[in-house]
Amino acid sequence: MSFNDHYVIIGNGPAGNHAAKTLRKKDKGARITIISDEMIPYYYKPKLTGFIADEIAQKDLLVTSLESYKEKDIRVRLGQAVEQIDPDSKSLVLKHMETIKYSKLIIATGSRERLLPFMSGYADHLKFITSYTDVMDYKDKIQNAKEFFIFGGDLVGFKFLKMLNSMGKKVTILIYPNAFWPYNLTEDMLDQIFTSLSQFDVSIIIKDDISTIDKKDNGSYRIKTLKGVEKTVDMVFSFNGLVPDIDFVKGSGIDTDYGILVNEYLKTNIDGIYACGSCAQIYNPDMKSYSASIGWPNAVVQGEVAAYNLLGDHKVIESVGRKYFDLEGVKIKTTWWGDINDASQE
Ligand SMILES: Cc1cc2nc3c(=O)[nH]c(=O)nc-3n(C[C@H](O)[C@H](O)[C@H](O)COP(=O)(O)OP(=O)(O)OC[C@H]3O[C@@H](n4cnc5c(N)ncnc54)[C@H](O)[C@@H]3O)c2cc1C
């Protein structure tokens, strides 16, 4: 037991919650705090599309109630964004300027939308589905809108498209070859996805690109493609993958690339600071490179491993769950850890 320790976890997703649970299991005396910039307790992101369509009730989105944090003696601070980390003074600064001291820190801030650089001029016109907060901003509008344009086409994008289709909405999708980044879809793969999605009542555009998106006075959007397709829609969504949400780490001395760089024990370059889940870029000693992990099951295991190692263990992280993804019939290897040569083994 360590009554003087204060373990702080930034992030209230699967990585942060499994870290907190593991810390509490192994250390009954320490103070444990989870900080989240969202107002909702731990929830299932994979259920967000069902929530938009009213197939899932708000209470069923939640993994954990506020009471269960109390039962485990874990303090949760909701609606509080961390803006700075100062490893020298072992403190965090929140957006409302409060300073919080920690003895050890786990960063589990997940990921946010990936805005393609050539689309940045249209950022105000694009909508994303990355969190409950996004969904609450657009849910009513989505339910009332009739026509949609989807640019990109990652796993969440295809899920969203099918949900809109089941709601009777008119949908056009322009599939971008790098939407499931860092992987690029070949022309054959695009053809295969086109065939698979053709069973739905949607317009599919492949091997083309956005030329312009203009907002009209009545609030609709006019989209033109390079090959001359023109569409007028009520909402435009971008689904081009997610990127680690780590802007607040800048200037702290914690090493980053596109994610927070950690070794195979999920430790950063600074003692006492760990990162896990989809904000982390993990060193693989076999591949001698860093890569980010994908998906909920990996975030769960990484949260647990980060917590064990923070407490002095030496557990090496491994990939769990799916090591390849099925993108509408196209199998894409995501060998961020194991070297999977044959996807059919899964
Ligand atoms: C719509 C959608 C559907 C998905 N469907 C699937 C699926 O079917 N299967 C699957 O395996 N994966 C799915 N995923 C991906 C999965 O949700 C993620 O891999 C997983 O949530 C990552 O967990 P995490 O704990 O690393 O981060 P997150 O779950 O993203 O949690 C990050 C937390 O950090 C908080 N945060 C961020 N920045 C700050 C800050 N500065 N200060 C304070 N708090 C901060 C956030 O509010 C959030 O609480 C889906 C994702 C989305 C968006």
Image (cartoon, grey):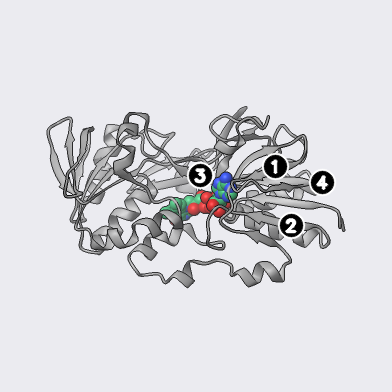
Instruction: Report helix, strand or loop for mark 1.
Output: strand
Q: Would residue 181 appear left or right of 263 to someone viewing this image?
A: left
Q: Which amino acid type is marked by label 2?
A: Ile
**Cβ of mark 3 under 8 A from ligand 1:** yes
Badge 2: residue crowd in 10 Å (few <14, some 14–19, many ≥20):
many
Name the residue nearer the viewer: 35 or 44: 35
Residue at 68% in and 35% down = 263
User: Residue 211 at what x, y percent from top left?
Assistant: 21, 31
Q: Would residue 18 appear left or right of 47 to someone viewing this image?
A: right
Q: Earlier in the sequence, mark 1 or mark 4?
A: 1
Mark 4 and mark 3 in contact? Answer it, CB < 8 Å.
no
Instruction: Report helix, strand or loop for mark 3.
Output: strand
User: Residue 307 at what x, y percent from top left?
Assistant: 72, 50
What is the CA distance from the residue labelled 3 to the residue labelled 2? 23 Å
- Residue where numbered disc 2 is placed: 32
Q: Judge whether residue 17 can be spotted in this image.
A: yes
What is the CA distance from the residue labelled 4 to the residue labelled 3? 27 Å
Q: Earlier in the sequence, mark 1 or mark 3?
A: 3
Mark 1 and mark 3 in contact? Answer it, CB < 8 Å.
no
- Residue where numbered disc 4 is placed: 312
Instruction: Report helix, strand or loop for mark 4.
Output: loop
Mark 2 and mark 1 in contact? Answer it, CB < 8 Å.
no
**Cβ of mark 2 under 8 A from ligand 1:** no
Q: Judge whether residue 109 can be spotted in this image.
A: no
- Residue where numbered disc 3 is placed: 111
What is the CA distance from the residue labelled 2 to the residue labelled 1? 15 Å
Which disc number belongs to residue 274?
1
Badge 1: residue crowd in 10 Å (few <14, some 14–19, many ≥20):
many
Give the quarter of the figure containing the N terminus: bottom right
Residue at 28% in and 54% down = 161
